[in-house]
Amino acid sequence: MKLHRLATSIRTFTLLAALAVASVGTATPRELVSVDGDNVNMRAGPSKRSEVLWRLGSGYPLKVLQRKGSWLRVVDFENDKGWVARSLTSSTPHTIVKSSRANLRSGPGTRYRVLGQARYGDVFQVLEKRKSWVRVQGEDDRKAWIARKLLWGG
């Protein structure tokens, strides 16, 4: 009798372990998208009839939480959640400044010259990533490096 319970326990443990490994293998990281257009509506629900919560500008980065038909449930860098039409998003990586100010530098490090400053909420296209730095391009086509810890998305 004890041997039977032990065998059953071992089979149960093996099954649970296999399920755990399988779920880890199929887990997908949250997808990032960016707004493709100006004044794109973030809505309360997945419908054109749903209340407009926010209007988002071009390049604004969003993290995808859920898909429902042609809609994406998303969250932004301020943890605001809503729905956007999938057709109004792009996979082109963008990032947004999450600190009050961020130095724009000529290279990926604090020893490089400061070219200017970005402010909270400024959006940039991501060109390249390094361990602690991101090379970005602004609306004016200027390129610079920003410390990764000062950014969200991309």
Image (tube, grey):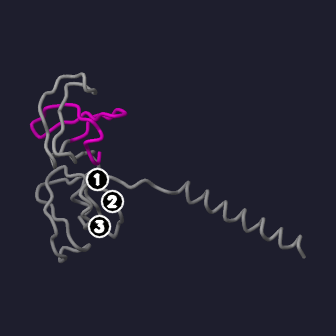
Asked whether 141 falls inside the magenta stretch, the response is: yes
Residue 84 location (% of width, % of height): 23, 64
Point out the image quarter for the N terminus: bottom right
Frontmost of labels 2 and 3 is 2
- Is residue 128 shown above or below 21? above
On whether residue 143 falls in the magenta region, the answer is yes
> Which residue is found at the position 25% from the left and 67% from the top?
83
x 46%, y 55%: residue: 28
Q: Which residue is mark 2?
A: 64
Q: For the residue carrying disc 3, how many other residues have a C-alpha within 10 Å: few (<14), some (14-19), or many (20+)?
A: few
Calculate the distance from the C-alpha at mark 1 to the C-alpha at mark 3.
14 Å
For label 3, the residue is 70
Measured Cα–Cα span from mark 2 to mark 1 = 7 Å
Q: Which element carries disc 2, helix, strand or loop?
A: strand
Q: Earlier in the sequence, mark 2 or mark 1?
A: 1
> Measured along the vertical axis of the image, is residue 65 above or below residue 51?
above
Q: Secondary structure at mark 1?
A: strand
Residue 13 on image: x %, y %: 72, 64
Foreground mark, 1 or 3? Answer: 1
> Is 4 or 71 nearer to us in this picture?
4
Q: Amino acid at mark 2?
A: Val
Q: Magenta segment, which residues?
A: 125-154
Q: Earlier in the sequence, mark 2 or mark 3?
A: 2
Image-quadrant location for residue 68? bottom left
Residue placed most toward the observer, 8 or 27: 8
The amino acid sitting under disc 1 is Val
Q: Which residue is mark 1?
A: 33
Dots 2, 1 in contact, CB < 8 A: yes
Instruction: Give SS at disc 3.
Output: loop
Q: Amino acid at mark 3?
A: Ser
